[in-house]
């Protein structure tokens, strides 16, 4: 399955006023980098990949529709997969974009 082009457009809209954002095809999805650091991506399997602080990830995975990203059988501590139903509205999506941007800015 390819990433959701509608989600990519929604992400572009929310990131439009952010400085130093670039886009790149990664992991079969559509990623957004902030200051050269990967922040957020429309996942090829549907939903959203978000990079967050490890301590935040421990808390956030307790929510419905949120799980750690697994890559090649390895759980990624700082990456969360957010299910499509958990980002159906802009009100739901915006905080995830903010989290990803904030984390990317903290490491770039």
Image: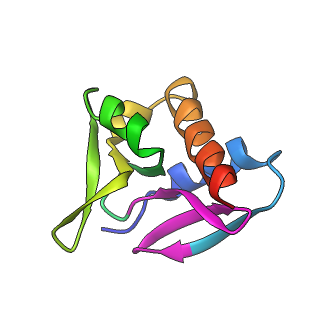
> What is the quadrant of residue 38 in the picture?
bottom right
Report the residue at 72% width, 47% height from top.
Answer: 15
Report the residue at 37% width, 32% height from top.
Answer: 86
Name above or below for residue 7 compared with residue 91: below
> What is the quadrant of residue 107 in the picture?
bottom right
What x and y, as percent, mark residue 78?
40, 52
Report the front residue among 10 and 41. 41
Question: Which stretch is magenta?
Answer: 25-43
What x and y, as percent, mark residue 48?
42, 49
| Dominant secondary-structure state across the stretch colored magenta | strand
Name above or below for residue 4 compared with residue 91: below
Report the residue at 40% width, 37% height from top.
Answer: 55
Name above or below for residue 18 compared with residue 30: above
What x and y, as percent, mark residue 83?
32, 41
Q: Check the picture and name the quadrant holding the N terminus.
A: bottom left
Q: Which residue lies furthest to the left in this view?
A: 73
81 sits to left or right of 17: left
Residue 58 lies in the magenta-colored region: no
What x and y, as percent, mark residue 30?
52, 66
């Amino acid at each position: 399955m390819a990433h959701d082009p509608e989600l990519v457009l929604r992400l572009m809209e929310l990131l439009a006023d952010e400085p130093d954002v670039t886009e790149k095809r990664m992991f079969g999805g559509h990623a957004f980098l902030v200051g050269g650091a990967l922040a957020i991506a429309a996942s090829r399997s549907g939903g959203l990949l978000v990079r967050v602080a490890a301590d935040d990830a421990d808390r956030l995975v307790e929510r419905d529709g949120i799980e750690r990203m697994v890559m090649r059988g390895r759980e990624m501590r700082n990456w969360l997969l957010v299910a499509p139903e958990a980002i159906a509205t802009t009100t739901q999506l915006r905080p995830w974009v903010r989290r990803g941007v904030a984390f990317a800015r903290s490491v770039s």
